[in-house]
Image: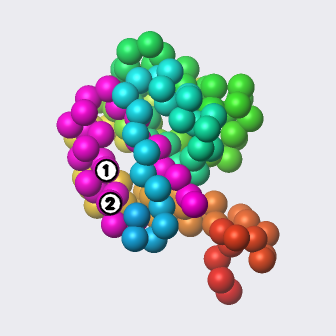
Amino acid sequence: MTTVLIVDDEPNIRALIEQALEDLTDEGVELVTAADGDEALEVVRAREPRLVFLDVMMPKRNGFDVCRAIKTELGLADTFVVMLTARGQSYDRKAGSDAGADLYLTKPFSPIDLLARVDEALGQWQASMPRGSLYAPVA
């Protein structure tokens, strides 16, 4: 099962993102949430999500550190990480890029844009799978 992880310390933001993505569960995508950086890394280790929506400003470990850990320390460079944060300055975007983020979006966000990003991320991943693989697109 493909897993999408939503990480934000604000419960309302997590719920909003889950709501925007809930139709994906009909397609076999599991939505999982975490409230801080340490919990996020626990989920990543256990579930190896395909896509992570990651806030920057969180308790225990910030999003840049979590992204860096996902991409390098855990060896999950193919995990698509979207930084989704209120911090939109150019130096924040550079820090996200330096940490390995694949995409940087600022709040407030459009649920439609979020769905488009999920389709893009999961589509790129599926297209890269070898023919005959469980997740490869059917030709």
Q: Amino acid at mark 2?
A: Glu
| Residue 17 lies in the magenta-colored region | yes
User: Looking at the image, which is closer to me, 107 or 15?
Assistant: 15
Q: Quadrant of the N terminus?
A: bottom right
Q: Residue at x 30, y 40 (%)?
A: 14
User: Looking at the image, which is closer to me, 91 or 55?
Assistant: 55
Q: Residue furthest front?
A: 46
- The answer to whether the residue labelled 2 contacts the one labelled 1, judged by CB atoms less than 8 Å apart, is yes
Q: Quadrant of the C terminus?
A: bottom right
Q: Amino acid at mark 1?
A: Glu
Task: Please report the bounds of the magenta region as a residue range.
Answer: 1-24
Residue 80 is at least partly visible in this image: no
Q: Residue at x 48, y 16 (%)?
A: 61
Q: Percent position (x, y) of residue 63?
A: 47, 25
Q: Residue at x 25, y 44 (%)?
A: 15
From this view, report whether residue 133 is shown above or below residue 19: below
With 48 as the anchor, is 120 left or right in this view? Answer: left
Residue 39 is at least partly visible in this image: yes
From this view, report whether residue 131 is shown above or below residue 52: below
Q: Which residue is mark 1?
A: 18
Alpha-carbon span between mark 2 and mark 1: 6 Å
From this view, report whether residue 46 is shown above or below residue 36: below
With 63 as the anchor, is 19 left or right in this view? Answer: left
Q: Which residue is mark 2?
A: 22
